[in-house]
Image: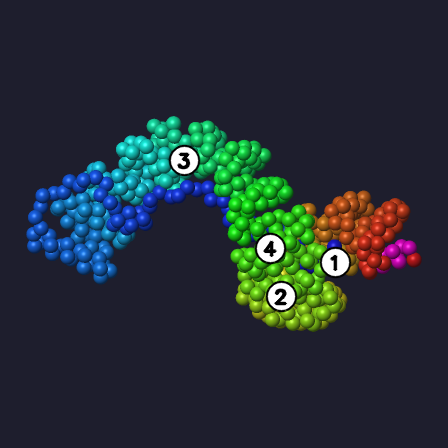
Amino acid sequence: MMNSKSGMPLLSLFLPLLLAACATTPQPAMEPADLTEAVHGQAVESKLVLPQLELNDQMLYEFMLADIAAQRGQPELAAQVYFDLAKSTRDPRVARRAAQLAYESHQMKRALEAFQLWQEVEPTSMLAKQMLATLLVSGGRLEEAQPQIAAMLAADPQNAGRSLVQLYPLFARHPDKAATYKSLRELARPYAHLAEAHWVQAQAAEAAGDHAAAMSEAQQARAIRPEWDMAALLEAQLSLREAPQQSLAVLKKYLASYPESNEVRLFYARALLEQKQYAESRVEFQRLQKQHPENAELAFAIALLSLQMGELDRAEQELQQTLRAGKKDSGTVYYYLAQLNEAKKNDAAALQQYAQVKDGDYVFASQLRIAYLLNKAGKLQEARAVLHKADAPHNQQRAQLLLVEAQMLRDAQQYDSASTVLGKGLEKLPNNPELLYEAAMVADKQGKPDVFESFIRKLIKVDPNHAHAYNALGYSLLERNVRLSEGMQLVEKAYQLAPDDAAIIDSMGWGYYRLGDLPKSLEFMRRAYAAFPDHEVAAHLGEVLWQTGAKDEARKIWQDGLKENPDSTVLKAVMKRFMP
């Protein structure tokens, strides 16, 4: 059987807009990019020990030269002069300025030297230690960074956990995940009593591919600080893929003790959604909405969940509520309202709502739906006019417009017009697989097998793995009862590429029927009918059953098929042949 339609979905209910993923990563460490603000506006951490030097003419000249260079957009020169001054004066203020300028001018080697000098002349500066360690980690120099970080953590043990968490995003960027994990294990070892130390090890272990170690560290982090939301989230994330129910249990237990944690609740709501527990997910989103009634995204998520659950009246009320709130882009809301009304068979309301989608991501899809509904109402020319006016900036969208128009014309049996539309499209997009396939289908309807075959042959050349192209050509040969061996080879090639496709399974059964192998034919036909009880498959299966002597079963399949498809010319024709 040839698959001759691409189809237009009625209702898109896979919830693509439910909110961005819940952020579970902590605030990043102070990176070198933050240096300007951190250094420039730094309060004196301790009383500076300043060198006893007099400002001479040479020093004054160099300071002026450096500042003028910085003002005139020559940071490299300014950094060089300040670095030389810092070395000669040993003044921590000058060293700090040299480090800032070296970083701003992207002189990483000079910046490292300046940071090292700054730390040397101001050994009590925690900021100098932090910046030097941060720059070393950012540059991937973990071995050099490790003693610096260890000293920094030891110098401020009360904030060691916070520092480890802040530094982790920098370590996470290092390409050697095993080396990162090893380094962080060493740094975290003295702080086994801190949940943060286990948290960073869990992250690094997972990145390095040691899932068991990651889970163990995450559980230790949560045991030390059961109230810490980041520990609960990490444990839940680590178990979500392999043990989703365990993950949900962790989140549910945490929320029972700490119900005000909105971040965990949002993650829990999304996790329930991923597990298709729609009602439970909606409850959690509603709890979040009670705390944030102004949040239009939450209201929209609740409406989509109601839509997914088939509660159309409730979903409509919730979408209208979202629309009245005015904080969600109206085009998206109108699109889903229109989809909902299509599901309710209220095409007139759907048309009005699709027409309201004037901006956003759903304008093009709405134009296609308007055309579809107009054509469905028998207004083919109006539908075509909508397609002609639709804005399609990309080739893929242009091809889609042509395909939809051609399919409408083909369904209306206006094959010559459909061929003209596709011909113009192929002039601009000669190698578009969808246009080539549709052009072949139209040629088949026109009774032009040679033209049909030429389009399919070109399609196979353009896309050698296009299963339906092989199937279409093979089935055409089998149906016309010509070149049966070649036809069967083509269908078998299609079957290799798509062994679960019902149309191709049907073609395999039909091929064996043409070749006289009724048992093999019946095996494939029954599989095809079980997967897709289409009227064409019913016609084929009934014919094979009739030829095997199972005439009562054949009659029943034909009659059942005709009840579902009373206008099926294929079924009527086969029944007339065998039951005149």
Above or below for 8 versus 374: above
Which stretch appears magenta?
Answer: 573-579
x then y, percent, for residue 42: 25, 46
- Total number of numbered discs in the rendering: 4
Q: CA distance from mark 1 to mark 2?
A: 45 Å
Q: Secondary structure at mark 2?
A: helix
Residue kind at label 1, given as amino acid type: Leu
**Residue situated in front as seen by the camera: 354 or 464:** 354
Name the image quarter holding the N terminus: bottom right
Q: Can residue 399 be spotted in the picture?
A: no
The reply to whether discs 1 and 2 touch (Cβ–Cβ < 8 Å) is no
* 447 in the magenta segment: no
Residue kind at label 2, given as amino acid type: Ala
**Residue situated in front as seen by the camera: 538 or 36:** 36
Q: CA distance from mark 4 to mark 2?
A: 19 Å
User: Which mark, by number, is residue 200?
Assistant: 3
Residue kind at label 3, given as amino acid type: Val
Q: CA distance from mark 3 to mark 2?
A: 51 Å
Q: Please give the name of the residue rendered at 32% of the width and 48% of the height, measured from the top-left corner.
A: 34
The mark nearer the N terminus, 3 or 4, is 3
The residue singled out by tag 4 in the image is 321
Q: Secondary structure at mark 1?
A: helix
The mark nearer the N terminus, 4 or 1, is 4
Q: Please give the name of the residue rendered at 30% of the width and 44% of the height, measured from the top-left corner.
A: 135
Q: Residue furthest right?
A: 580
Q: CA distance from mark 3 to mark 4?
A: 43 Å
User: Which mark, by number, is residue 477?
Assistant: 1
The residue singled out by tag 2 in the image is 355
The mark nearer the N terminus, 3 or 2, is 3
Above or below for 308 versus 182: below
Q: Secondary structure at mark 3?
A: helix
Q: Can residue 207 be spotted in the picture?
A: yes
